[in-house]
Image: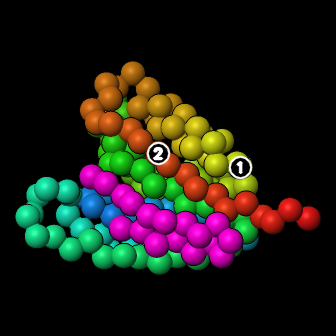
Amino acid sequence: TSAAGVLDVASGERAFARAGHDQPVLVPAASPPTTLSVEGGPVLGLIEASDFPVNRLRLGPGDAVVLYTDGVSEAQDMVGEFFGTDRIVATAVSLRHAAAPALTGGLLGAVRAFAGEAPQSDDITILTLRRLAPPA
């Protein structure tokens, strides 16, 4: 899977494409986190001629977006229950105002706590982008 994008730090405009990734989570500074319903393409290399739609999103000051591999959402506990998107969003709610590294670390910690002693079955990759508020 892959994700690629460009962020204009002055305007907060983000253009990005997804190839097989789960829906990102938007963490607005002033409202609850939610999954973004954005277009994506297939896993890279799966289909020779594939389209990867470009999505656009404007991040306001303090807004964040969290991208993650399916190893996060599909992490399992000892009885085989998945961590799932709802837990990702719930974790983002509790860390909504944290700096990007703390939001990423908090989500990783939540996944590890959920999985407990269950073996990790897939890669776990998390990327958090937060647009900083302009200096006062």
Q: Is residue 102 above or below residue 95?
A: above
In-front residue for pair 70/74 = 70
Neighbor class of circle 1 (other Cα within 10 Å; few <14, some 14-19, many 20+) is: some
User: Quick check: 124 left or right of 43?
Assistant: right
Residue in view at x 32 percent, y 48 percent = 70
User: Quick check: 36 left or right of 20?
Assistant: right
Q: What colour scheme does the image use?
A: rainbow
Residues shaded magenta: 1-17
Residue in view at x 41 percent, y 76 percent = 55
Residue receiving disc 1: 98
Q: Is residue 101 above or below residue 118?
A: below
Residue 76: quadrant of the picture = top left
Query: Which amino acid does the dot numbered 1 rest on?
Result: Ala
Q: Magenta residues: mostly which secondary structure? A: strand
The reply to whether discs 1 and 2 touch (Cβ–Cβ < 8 Å) is no
Residue receiving disc 2: 126
> Where in the figure is residue 112, as x and y percent of width and height?
47, 31
> Where in the figure is residue 68, as x and y percent of width and height?
42, 50
Residue in view at x 68 percent, y 71 percent = 10
Whether the magenta-drawn stretch holds residue 11 is answered as yes
> Where in the figure is residue 60, as x and y percent of width and height?
68, 73
Q: Is residue 96 above or below residue 17?
A: above
Whether the magenta-drawn stretch holds residue 36 is answered as no
User: Quick check: 85 left or right of 89?
Assistant: left
* Outermost residue toward the left in this view: 48
Residue 80 appears in the figure: yes
Residue in view at x 52 percent, y 71 percent = 14
Residue 122: quadrant of the picture = top left
Which numbered dot is residue 36?
none
